[in-house]
Structures are given as C-alpha cells and as structure tokens.
Image (cartoon, grey):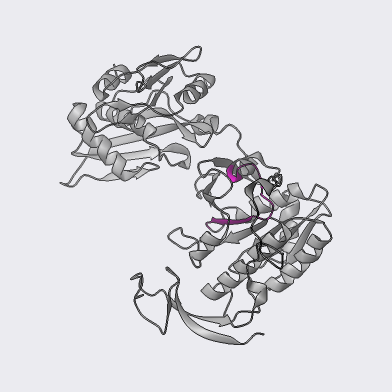
Amino acid sequence: MAKSRSRWVCSECQSTHSGWYGKCPSCGAWNTIEEVCDPQDAPAGRVVLSSATTAAAVALSEVGEETPRITAGMPEVDRVLGGGFVPGSVVLLGGAPGIGKSTLLLQVAAHLAKGKRSVLYASGEESLQQIAGRARRLGADGERLLLLAETRTETILHTARELALAGELELVVVDSVQTVYSSDNDGLPGNTGQVRAVSTQLISFAKQHDIPVVIVGHITKDGQLAGPRLLEHMVDTVLGFEGDDDRATRLLRASKNRFGSTLELGVFEMTSEGLREIHNPSEAFLSQRPTDAPGSCITVSMQGARPLLLEVQALLASSPGGNPRRNSVGVDPSRLAMMLAVLDRHGGQFVLDQDVFVNVTGGVRLSEPAADLAVLLAVASSHRRVAMPGDMVAVGEVGLTGELRHAARIDVRLAEAARLGFKRAIIAPSSSGKAPKAPKGLKVRAPKTVREALELALE
C-alpha cells in the first residue's frame, strides 16, 4: 500500500483545510469537513484521456467522427442516453433503495451480452449466487454475461482490462461505488476519499480502453447522490431512476448528459419478471382517469422529443383556519400560487381562501409553463364543481396580466392528442396570430385571455 498523508476536505465545496472545523470557512456548510488520507504515489488513480506519451494539438478538421453508439437493447434506455452508450463514457445511475437500479442494469447487460462481446457485471453488494438467481428470474441467460462479486477496484479493473485488451468487452457495470474500495486509499468503502479514488480509476479505465462504464450510486435521505458532489462533475451522464412503493411505474431521466438531451423520459413498469418498457405512456397514464369528475384537466407535455398526455387533478376545500394550505405534487408550488392569483384577479374566481390540492397523475413532474392553463382550468373546475369535457385538452402559458401565451411545438402536441381520440383543444394563440393547422377530427380554439378560456372550458 502506498504511503499516505492526511488532509481535511469539505465534502460540499471540496476545499482543503489545515484541520477540522464545525463550519466550512469556504462555503459555510456545517459538519462537512472530513479527514481524507491521500496516497502520495498512486499512478493508477490518474484520469488518462490519451495514451500518447506526448501531447500535440490536432486541427479540428483532422479529428475523426464519433464512434457509433452502443445500443442498450431497451429503447427507453437508449432514448434517455441520447441514442445509446457512447464508447469511453461513464454513466452514474442513482435511485432510492429497492427502486430497481440493479434490475434495470442486469436487463441491459443481458441484452448486450447477446452480441459478439461480453459484459462484465461487478457487484460489491451481492454474491454470485444472488446475482445469478435474479438474472435467471429476469430471463437472462448466456455465456457472455460475466459476473464478478468483488469489492476491490483493482481486481475489478484487472479483469476488465484483460477482456478489453482481448477485444471481448462491451460494457462494465459496477454496483455500487459506495461498496467498493481502492487499495491506494485508506478509509472504509463509501467515504469521501474512497468514492473519489474508485471513481477516478473507473473513469481512467473507460477513457483508456474506450469502454463504457456504468456506476451505481446510492442516494441520501433527501434524494441527493451520496458522496462528494465532484463525482457528478467527473462522469459524463447522471441518470436518476424514480418511482414509489404505491405505483409500479418507474421513470428514468437524466440530470446531466454530455452526449444528449436532459429532457427525455423513459417509462417502465415493474413486474414479477422485471422491468417492462411502456412505449406509449400517454395511454397508460390516462387509462384510469374519470371523464366526468370536476377538477380534472388533460394537458400535453413535451418530455424531450416525446409528447405525453397527462391528467392534472385539483381539489378545493374550505379552509378551517386563516392560513389556507397549498399542496402540489408534480407542479411547482410557486407557479401554482401564481395561477391562483391570476384566477382570482382575471378569472373572477375567488379561490385564495380555499385549501388547494393539485396532483399530476402517474408521478410525472410538469416543469414547463405550457401546463399553466391545465392547472388553472383544473382548479377552476373544482371550485365551480363543473366537469370539463372528457375529450378536451388544454395547452398554454398563463401570464400575470391574464393573457395566454403560445406553447412551443404545438403541432406535435395536437397530433398526439388527436391520435388518442381527443376531439377538442384549448390553446394559446400563436405569436404570429395564425392558428395552427388542426389535425383531422380535432377542433382547436385559441382564446386570448384566461376569462375566455374559462368560458370555453366550463361553458
């Protein structure tokens, strides 16, 4: 083991200090100073982007095209990655315990192992028998899916390096970064120094051998990835696997992607046979919606290049106290407060003294302003106890002066609504004043103000 020296590092801002502090002098965070033992000589921990002995500048015109991506065998995963795994890239996958991270990666590994090259699945959490048993339950079988139960990074990379040099390696999965350790660094697995050292060696391997590496990361109780924040900066892609115990639906989204969009969404359903891809999530999200209940409104949200039809539900009740509650799931609370104020001032609906509950079914978050109109109409429908037509969708941004603003890619949204059988749509007028071409069978109305939209939806 290399000779080590000790230093004190803040896990939030990564600043180095001479000793322990209760409060970091640099960023002001409390209880983030940790003692880290760094090896003085650890060449294996260096991130190497080029194997050349000398560095030379290369003209842009002389740089070749990107290497073709490696498809994961699951279209929903490829969609979120931007088309598949980029050779030499490092992907960090995080999610709550038991959400299905290992199941997802084992299914991806099984798909890739059906090709000409092998996939190395290294686990520091399960034995070989446990991994193999779960793989067989998922229907994974093949000689090219190689399993390794190991917690020492050097052993994992030694095996991966031999396969890579023989040209037989397609992908490396390490589950998880908090359970493996490096011999070049002191400390228990999972501490700041070990996570940094392990990640550095895995990234170095990926860049040297042009092999994609997927790292599983644990999350803290507040939903953040455990370990130093530097880890998210070092990797190429950060994926989050979301869901809850009450629903079988699982959502895969990217918070960082150097090779694609972070707006794409992958939708899965957890079954007894593993994760099943939902290729048409709009139908799945709307399958159980009521068609004649007040407080329900359908909107079309763009999740990257995919239009999704989602139901916004609202419930208003008399507030027993002088401080009405505002609870929202899937909708930004600040935008909900804005919609209530606009509805009160420009819609003639006094709702500010009511308890307001808003929910987006399916567990999807509505972050774009184009969902404003659906939220506003759902609240107004619940307040007036009048149901909106079941074959109507609403798309548009609401301004503070009561005007409606045009939503981007409205033609794609309307086409998806028409495909699923909706007959009417309320949208904001375009900036040019021209109404978009309505798909066959869909009647489009474009009111200019909130009051006009209320009259059309709740007439």
The reply, left or right, for residue 192 in relation to residue 131 is left
Q: Is residue 141 above or below residue 300?
A: below
Q: State the residue in front, 458 or 184.
A: 184
Q: Which residues are magenta?
A: 80-96
Magenta-colored stretch includes residue 75: no
Q: State the residue in front, 448 or 54.
A: 54
* Residue at screen point 46% across, 27% down: 409
The reply, left or right, for residue 33 in relation to residue 440 is left
The reply, left or right, for residue 358 in relation to residue 268 is left
* Residue at screen point 76% across, 64% down: 160
Q: State the residue in front, 412 or 317.
A: 412
Say which quarter of the image contains residue 426: top left
Q: Is residue 255 above or below residue 318?
A: below
- Residue 302, percent from left and from top: 48, 33
Magenta-colored stretch includes residue 83: yes
- Residue 38, percent from left and from top: 56, 80
The reply, left or right, for residue 71 in relation to residue 400 is right
- Residue 154, percent from left and from top: 71, 73
Say which quarter of the image contains residue 69: top right
Q: Quadrant of the N terminus?
A: bottom right
Q: Quadrant of the C terminus?
A: top left
User: Farthest left residue?
Assistant: 322
Q: Is residue 201 visible?
A: yes
Q: Is residue 151 visible?
A: no
Q: Is residue 91 above or below residue 54?
A: above
- Residue 24, percent from left and from top: 36, 75
* Residue at screen point 65% across, 85% down: 2
